Image (cartoon, grey):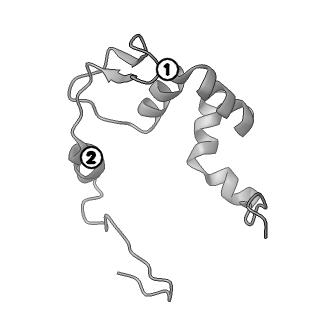
Amino acid sequence: MSESEIIWRPTPEVIERARLTKFMRAHGVASLEALQRRSVDDAEWYWDAVSKYLGFRWMNPYGRVLDTSRGIAFPRWFEGGLMNLSDNCVDRHVDEGRGEQPAIIWEAEDGHVR
């Protein structure tokens, strides 16, 4: 098998249920290639849209998504924004009524689940 060989492709059903598909439809993006192109051409739009679509909770909202005024090697992301990682990864799920559900499910190669 070569490195460039595709070894798995999602079924149409998996594609239909994917959050990425729903994101693309919500933003009128017709194809994965178009989304990739737009994310590169307009990174500020893309990351703002992702932040909002995923429902990130900000303690202080950001003023600007991306500032490259110091050069592309020194980007400043979500300027002025302040978020709590625990709030976004754990607390929000409790607030939304999913506090009794497992947060992490681990599955071994042999199928053992914890």
Dot label at residue 73: none
Residue in the image at 59% along x and 44% along y = 20
Q: Relative to residue 80, is residue 20 depicted above or below?
A: below
Dot 1 falls on a residue whose secondary structure is helix
Quarter the C terminus occupies: bottom left
> What kind of residue is marked 1?
Glu
Q: Which quadrant holds residue 51?
A: top left
Q: Residues within 10 Å of mark 1 (few under 14, many from 20)?
A: some
Of callouts 2 and 1, which one flags the residue occurring earlier in the amino acid sequence?
1
Residue 107 located left or right of residue 21? left
Residue 20 located left or right of residue 94? right
Residue 35 located left or right of residue 92? right
Residue in the image at 25% along x and 44% along y = 85
Residue 34 located left or right of residue 68? right
Find disc 1 in the rendering and name its residue. 44
Closer to viewer: mark 2 or mark 1 = 1
Q: Is residue 37 visible?
A: yes
Dot 2 falls on a residue whose secondary structure is helix
Residue in the image at 64% along x and 25% along y = 38
Q: Residue 18: x percent and y percent?
A: 60, 51
Find disc 2 in the rendering and name its residue. 92
Q: Relative to residue 93, is residue 76 depicted above or below?
A: above
Between the C-alphas of marks 2 and 1, the distance is 25 Å
Q: Is residue 29 visible?
A: no
> What kind of residue is marked 2?
Arg
Front residue of this view, candidates 1 and 112: 1
Q: Residue 30: x percent and y percent?
A: 74, 32
Q: Residue 104: x percent and y percent?
A: 34, 67
